Image (cartoon, helix red, strand yellow):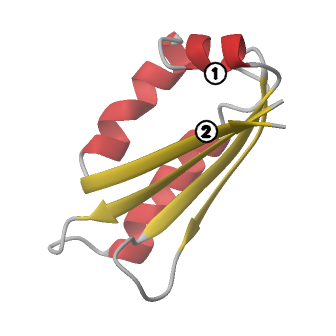
Amino acid sequence: MVKHIVMYCLREDCDKSAAVEEIRTALEALVGVVPGLITMQIRQTTGGKYDYVLYSEFESEEALTNYKTDPAHLAVKPIVHGYITDRVAADYTV
């Protein structure tokens, strides 16, 4: 299993709670659609540089690689990228 964690900074001029909710709804709907995606959670953070975190689990490294080019994921990316100014990601195998 591969855990994929991404933290994002949102634009200062957006309603951050509404943005996180829109992003959460779009991304969490990918579970059951994208092969190998086991779970995905998006939550707003408190304090620190980043505004929200994405936590997801994939069956394998291959599943994570395929997720990055999956049409369902690519359809959601414009929503996410419409709000973010910065991101940092980490993946690890368990």
Q: Compared with residue 27, is residue 8 higher up or lower down, i.e. above or below?
A: below
Q: Compared with residue 26, is residue 32 higher up or lower down, i.e. above or below?
A: above
Q: Compared with residue 30, is residue 22 higher up or lower down, i.e. above or below?
A: below
Q: Disc 2, disc 1: CB below 8 Å? A: yes
Q: Position of residue 13 (x, y in %)?
A: 14, 73
Query: Split into 4 quadrants, where in the image is the C terminus?
Result: top right
Q: Compared with residue 5, is residue 49 higher up or lower down, i.e. above or below?
A: below
Q: Position of residue 48 (x, y in %)?
A: 40, 83
Which residue lies at the image location 38% right of the left edge and 71% below the top edge? Answer: 50
Q: Which mark lies nearer to you, 2 or 1?
A: 2
**Within 10 Å of the Cα at label 2, are there few (<14), some (14-19), or many (20+) other Cα atoms?**
some
Name the residue tied to disc 2. Answer: 91
Q: Looking at the rendering, which quadrant does residue 56 occupy?
A: top right
Q: Amino acid at mark 2?
A: Asp
Which residue lies at the image location 61% right of the left edge and 38% below the top edge? Answer: 91
Query: Split into 4 quadrants, where in the image is the N terminus?
Result: top right
Which comes before the other along the chain, label 2 or label 1? 1
Name the residue tied to disc 1. Answer: 64
The answer to whether 7 appears left or right of 11 in the picture is right
